[in-house]
């Protein structure tokens, strides 16, 4: 299974409750850059799963449009407080080969850490609009996944 994890782009802060914070113009650019990077790498997705928070849904929608994915599945298992085992179970039940997850920090980095080391203690940081690519067996086995790459927006600017 190929897992692509994207952190939502930069979001507005003032005047919004946290779940309703929309992407800023910078955040929209970051999401488009992530989508274009995935396209340049030839990524074909079977599904996109997104946190229900607005900034994540907007990021997922931008990726969906660029990569022509049919649907975005909204899941509570990608909110910052969710137990990582819940999203693992959902992914295993989904049975897809190439899935993109859109979520938040520090939840995504601790999820990556759990997948590759079996603990949440690996020091990783997903930049806003960043992408990680993980290869795993199906069903997903904690601690037995491989982090292939982790890119922030600055690195993605150099992808051709």
Image: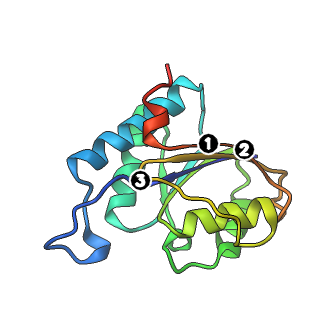
Earlier in the chain: of badge 2 and badge 3, it is: 2
The CA span between labels 1 and 3 is: 23 Å
> Exactly how many numbered labels are in the figure?
3
- Residue 88 in view of the camera: yes
Horizontal arrangement in the rendering, residue 33 relative to residue 37 (left or right): left
Residue depicted at 36% across the width and 43% down the height: 30
Q: Is residue 137 above or below residue 105?
A: above
Residue shown at 63% from the left, 68% from the top: 110
- Say if mark 1 contacts mark 2, CB within 8 Å: yes
Q: Position of residue 41 (x, y in %)?
A: 59, 26
* Residue assigned mark 3: 128
| Residue found at x 78% / y 59% | 116
Q: Which type of secondary structure does the marked residue at label 2 adopt?
A: loop
Distance from Cα at disc 1 to Cα at disc 2: 7 Å
Residue appearing at x 69%, y 58% in the figure: 94
Identify the residue position indicated by label 1 in the image: 46
Q: Is residue 42 above or below residue 138?
A: above
Residue 9: mark = none
Q: In this view of the protein, which residue sits in the foreground, 140 or 46?
A: 140
Residue 97 badge: 2
The residues tagged by marks 2 and 3 sit, at their Cα atoms, a distance apart of 25 Å
Q: What crowding class fits label 2: few (fewer than 14 Cα within 10 Å), some (14-19), or many (20 or more)?
A: some
């Amino acid at each position: 299974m190929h897992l692509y994890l994207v952190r939502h782009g930069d979001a507005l802060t003032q005047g919004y409750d946290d779940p309703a914070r929309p992407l800023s113009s910078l955040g929209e650019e970051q999401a488009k850059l992530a989508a274009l990077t995935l396209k340049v790498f030839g990524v074909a997705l079977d599904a996109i799963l997104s946190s229900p928070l607005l900034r994540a849904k907007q990021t997922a929608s931008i990726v969906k449009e660029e990569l022509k994915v049919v649907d975005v599945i909204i899941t509570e298992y990608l909110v910052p407080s969710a137990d990582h085992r819940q999203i693992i179970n959902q992914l295993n039940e989904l049975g897809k080969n190439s899935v993109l997850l859109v979520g938040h920090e520090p939840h995504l980095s601790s999820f990556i850490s759990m997948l590759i080391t079996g603990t949440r203690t690996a020091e990783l940081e997903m930049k806003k609009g960043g992408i990680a690519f993980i290869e795993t067996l199906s069903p997903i086995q904690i601690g037995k996944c491989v982090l292939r790459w982790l890119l922030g927006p600055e690195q993605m600017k150099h992808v051709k």
